Image (cartoon, grey):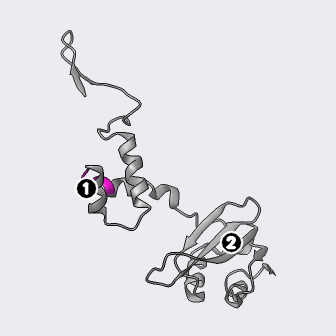
Amino acid sequence: QRYLCRGCHTYFTANTYIVEKNCFIAKQVHYKILEELTEKQAMTTISKHCGVSWSTVSRTLASLLPMTNVKRNWLPRCLLVDEFRSLKNQVGPYSFSCMDGDTGKLLDILPSRKKKDLVSYFMQFERRARLNVKILVTDMNASYASLIKECFPHAKLVV
């Protein structure tokens, strides 16, 4: 809300913890949008559920982008890779995850576990970052073992 000071005739905005500064939509609405974005549904459906415009849903989703950017100049010394069954998507029923073996932190999840997609993904990293990987921990999947030759020449395979 905007208020007019009758003494100096300037406008000011009320401050509250419910709404971010310079924003008119409550934080709880943004949280509800984020919760609904975890389900498979159209953005227009989410906007109707939350009583906001489609562009507000889109901006809320875009606000997560800085948190998802993967640094392409660094990879951990110990890289854990595995596939897991996920929701069936246009690529296939399995997704691929990679984690930092030293900290246990999830680095990224890819929609495909196909070798060509994995090689393409890891080749986006700087060569120096790929040479930093000394240990690649995986299961018995042969395509992951072949990643060492193409992407991580200094790494040892641990099954």
Dominant SS in magenta: helix
Q: Nearer the viewer, residue 110 or 93?
A: 93
On screen, residue 89 versus residue 97, left or right, reads left
Residue furthest to the top in view is 7
Up the image or down, 157 lies above or below 56; here it is below
Q: Residue at x 45, y 80 (%)?
A: 89
Residue 77 in the image: state x and y as whole percent. Answer: 76, 67
| Of labels 2 and 1, the one closer to you | 1
Q: Residue at x 25, y 55 (%)?
A: 48
Q: Quadrant of residue 141?
A: bottom right
Q: State how far apart marks 2 and 1 are (Cα).
A: 48 Å
Up the image or down, 29 lies above or below 127; here it is above
The three-letter code of the residue at mark 2 reads: Arg
Residue bounds of the magenta highlight = 52-57
Which element type, helix, strand or loop, lies under badge 2? Answer: helix
Residue 49 in the image: state x and y as whole percent. Answer: 29, 54
On screen, residue 25 versus residue 147, left or right, reads left
Residue 97 in the image: state x and y as whole percent. Answer: 62, 72
Disc 2 designates what residue? 128
